[in-house]
């Protein structure tokens, strides 16, 4: 541990006054509603997506309560169909897709680049209001007859049901514009607003993941928008596009939908992978192993992910040749993901690992995403998929990848950047306990669903045979445990805003540029120009007892070569 001389120049550690940070330099609802500050927009996205997560989670609790016993438990069959549809739609479109790219990405991406803001601040604000508008419309389904099609809106049922498919599809159509605007903004920002000297090889891997995600958002989202718009047109005008009674083809809808929705998996997972690269490196105190391989694998996933949509349609009647090709491509897309996992494990090898809450979530991600990825290989096999298709095996696989992977990474990122975002430290011992509870509860919820699926339990069913009761009861118990952990997390994070100790600029020892500004950040991000270092150059840092966090070594703050590596 080191206490640096006060005369040594170094980045500011704490705001000089309340008016020196983005949270308090302007007050009132309008100062937030019409802000152009990417940090405030990120916080608005964060609050909105967490609200959607709370609602989607409560619906999940209702589902698991209903499935405690065969037959009606607390709701009837029609209500159940509405509940699981809205649970899926809210979680996918209002939480998982925007939470890391739009919420956390909006906050930290310009800071990581040493920029004052994103390239198009007004477009950034517009993207949030588009998200809010689409979200309100989607939630309006609750008041206008419900939605019972499943979150995929499969035809021909979605073109004939009397529920609020029209409002829901318009909501999804509008939400897509926000995703596209965010992708355009981030790509432009990464290309044009990097700190001088910050070459592509000096970008944090989270930036590479956001870049690859933005490419998918721009190229794939219009396909979904056009697809749901066609459903709306067919319902309103009676044009035969997907409805076979009108001369349409329902399988065509599946092609359109999954051409977007499988790349959409990587809109959720790629930013999560970028987060894991940051967390594992920082909390292992080692430069990331295989930087170029991880960066390149992000782009490879984004590209190959466009060619595997047909593995969702092995039972739809497509030819054996098409099924074989899609099966091979499905195995191929696993390769860049495996490269990442190998490099993360290699980074931890002989590292000085600290099991703070963000790192526990990162380790949880490796386990949960690993199970999700490996079980995806079963579903990518033509013969095996015929047996497992539309069973609880698919439910478990989907949740291990999308929720276990993306949610674990999000929780890790939220705890990692919480001190930077709000300038307060949370209760670390309680956070570690909750991280373990989330991990245990999630596995208890979904691992038994693999077993139930192999035994033939179909997904989306309101009722089931008595022989599946034990699996559903174990799953529901795990869901309640996970829900309890989430409420405790919400409690201590909110308490930290009032009673948490002030956070130093760099409590974890991260070497990326966002840790060189104050906590919370200055309204214009950096009160002094940041000093460019490698994103994983931990040798440039030393722990300073006076500020309670890490600072640049004096020679680096003055631009001189770095000395020996500093550990806490």
Image (cartoon, rainbow, N blue to C red):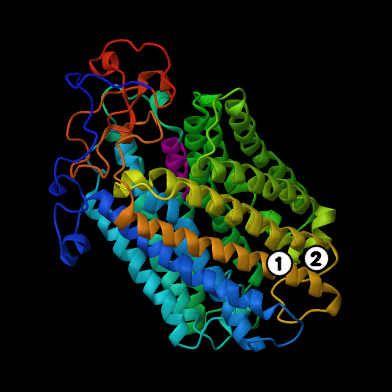
Q: Nearer the viewer, residue 303 or 266?
A: 266
Report the predominant secondary structure element of the magenta stretch. helix
Q: Earlier in the sequence, mark 1 or mark 2?
A: 2
Q: Which residue is mark 2?
A: 452
Q: Residue at x 13, y 48 (%)?
A: 19
Q: Residues within 10 Å of mark 1 (few under 14, many from 20)?
A: many
Please state if 349 lies on the left or on the right of 430 as rendered: right
Q: Position of residue 548 (x, y in %)?
A: 32, 33
Residue at 78% x, 68% y is 471
Relative vertical location of residue 435 with respect to residue 249 in this rendering, above or below: above
**Region in magenta:** 206-216
Disc 1 versus disc 2: nearer the observer = 1
Magenta run includes residue 154 = no
Q: Are marks 1 and 2 in contact (CB under 8 Å)?
A: yes
Q: Mark 2, residues whose alpha carbon is within 10 Å: few (<14), some, or many (≥20)?
A: many
Q: Which residue is mark 1?
A: 475
Secondary structure type for disc 1: helix
Residue 198 point in image, percent of width and height: 32, 25
């Amino acid at each position: 541990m080191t206490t640096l001389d006060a005369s040594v120049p170094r980045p500011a550690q704490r705001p000089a006054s309340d008016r020196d940070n983005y949270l308090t330099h302007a007050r009132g609802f309008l100062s937030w509603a019409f802000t152009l500050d990417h940090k405030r927009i990120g916080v608005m996205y964060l609050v909105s997506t967490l609200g959607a997560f709370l609602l989607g989670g409560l619906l999940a609790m209702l589902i698991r309560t209903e499935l405690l016993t065969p037959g009606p438990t607390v709701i009837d069959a029609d209500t159940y169909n509405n509940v699981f549809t809205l649970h899926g739609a809210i979680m996918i479109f209002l939480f998982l897709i925007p939470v890391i790219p739009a919420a956390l990405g909006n906050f930290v991406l310009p800071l990581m680049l040493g920029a004052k803001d994103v390239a198009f601040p007004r477009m950034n604000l517009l993207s949030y209001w588009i998200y809010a508008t689409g979200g309100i419309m989607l939630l309006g389904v609750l008041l206008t007859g419900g939605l019972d099609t499943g979150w995929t809106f499969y035809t021909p049922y979605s073109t004939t049901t009397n529920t609020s498919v029209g409002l829901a599809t318009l909501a999804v159509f509008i939400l897509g514009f926000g995703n596209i605007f965010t992708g355009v903004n981030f790509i432009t920002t990464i290309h044009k607003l990097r700190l001088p000297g910050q070459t592509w090889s000096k970008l944090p891997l989270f930036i590479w993941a956001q870049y690859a995600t933005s490419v998918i958002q721009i190229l794939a989202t219009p396909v979904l928008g056009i697809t749901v718009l066609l459903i709306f047109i067919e319902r309103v005008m009676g044009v035969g596009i997907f409805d076979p009674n009108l001369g349409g083809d329902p399988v065509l809808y599946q092609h359109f939908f999954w051409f977007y929705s499988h790349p959409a998996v990587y809109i959720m997972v790629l930013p999560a992978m970028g987060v894991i690269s940051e967390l594992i490196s920082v909390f292992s105190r080692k430069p990331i192993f295989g930087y170029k391989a991880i960066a390149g694998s992000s782009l490879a996933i984004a590209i190959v992910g466009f060619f595997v949509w047909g593995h969702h349609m092995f039972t739809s009647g497509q030819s054996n040749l098409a099924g074989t090709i899609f099966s091979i491509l499905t195995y191929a897309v696993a390769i860049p993901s495996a490269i990442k996992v190998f490099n993360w494990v290699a980074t931890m090898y002989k590292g000085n690992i600290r099991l703070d809450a963000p790192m526990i979530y990162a380790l949880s991600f490796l386990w949960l995403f690993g199970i999700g990825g490996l079980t995806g290989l079963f579903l990518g096999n033509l013969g095996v998929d015929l047996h497992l298709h539309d069973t609880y095996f698919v439910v478990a696989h989907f949740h291990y990848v999308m929720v276990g992977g993306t949610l674990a990474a999000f929780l890790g990122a939220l705890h990692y950047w919480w001190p930077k975002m709000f300038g307060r430290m949370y209760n670390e011992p309680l956070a570690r306990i909750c991280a373990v509870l989330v991990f245990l509860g999630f596995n208890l919820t979904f691992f038994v669903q693999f077993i139930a699926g192999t035994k033939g339990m179909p997904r989306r069913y309101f009722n089931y045979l008595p022989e599946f009761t034990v699996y559903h009861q174990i799953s529901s118990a795990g869901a309640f445990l996970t829900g309890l952990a989430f409420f405790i997390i919400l409690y201590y994070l909110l308490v930290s805003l009032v009673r948490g100790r002030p956070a130093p600029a760099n409590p974890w020892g991260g070497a990326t540029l966002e840790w060189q500004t104050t906590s919370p950040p200055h309204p214009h991000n950096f009160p002094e120009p940041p000093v460019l270092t490698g994103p994983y150059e931990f040798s440039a840092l030393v722990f300073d007892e006076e500020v309670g966090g890490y600072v640049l070594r004096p020679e680096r703050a003055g631009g001189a070569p770095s000395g020996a590596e500093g550990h806490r």
